[in-house]
Image (cartoon, rainbow, N blue to C red):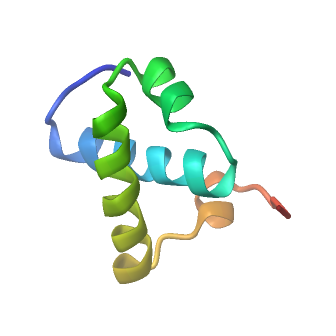
């Protein structure tokens, strides 16, 4: 958690933000608090995460080995 620019960590944080907000229904404020980052950072990460999921084929259920029906 917390800010950082290490490539792998930053990419993982982007997907976590996107999935937490879009798939799990968490508020951006809650995600920001839990990850110790700013709300605008979460907002940008959500946009990047949508693009990553679409372009790189990331799959929420497969990555987390869960089956979520929302």
Q: Is residue 2 left or right of residue 69?
A: left
Q: Position of residue 58 (x, y in %)?
A: 48, 70
Q: Position of residue 3 (x, y in %)?
A: 24, 24
Name the residue at the right extreme. Answer: 69
Q: Is residue 46 above or below residue 16?
A: below
Residue at the image position 81 percent from the left and 61 percent from the top: 67
Q: Quadrant of the N terminus?
A: top left
Quadrant of the image occupied by residue 41: top left
Using the image as rendered, state which of residue 14 and residue 30 is in the foreground: 30
Q: Quadrant of the C terminus?
A: bottom right
What count of labels does the image hold? 0
Using the image as rendered, state which of residue 51 and residue 60 is in the foreground: 51
Q: Is residue 12 left or right of residue 21?
A: left
Residue at the image position 58 percent from the left and 45 percent from the top: 20
Q: Position of residue 48 (x, y in %)?
A: 31, 61
Q: Is residue 42 above or below residue 55?
A: above
Quadrant of the image occupied by residue 65: bottom right
Quadrant of the image occupied by residue 37: top left
Q: Is residue 12 above or below residue 40?
A: below
Residue at the image position 15 percent from the left and 37 percent from the top: 6
Q: Is residue 43 left or right of residue 17?
A: left
């Amino acid at each position: 958690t917390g800010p950082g620019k290490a490539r792998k960590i930053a990419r993982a944080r982007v997907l976590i933000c996107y999935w937490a907000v879009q798939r799990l229904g968490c508020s951006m404020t809650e995600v920001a608090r839990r990850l110790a980052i700013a709300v605008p950072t979460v907002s940008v990460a959500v946009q990047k995460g949508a693009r990553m999921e679409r372009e790189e084929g990331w799959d929420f259920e497969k990555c987390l080995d869960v089956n979520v029906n929302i």
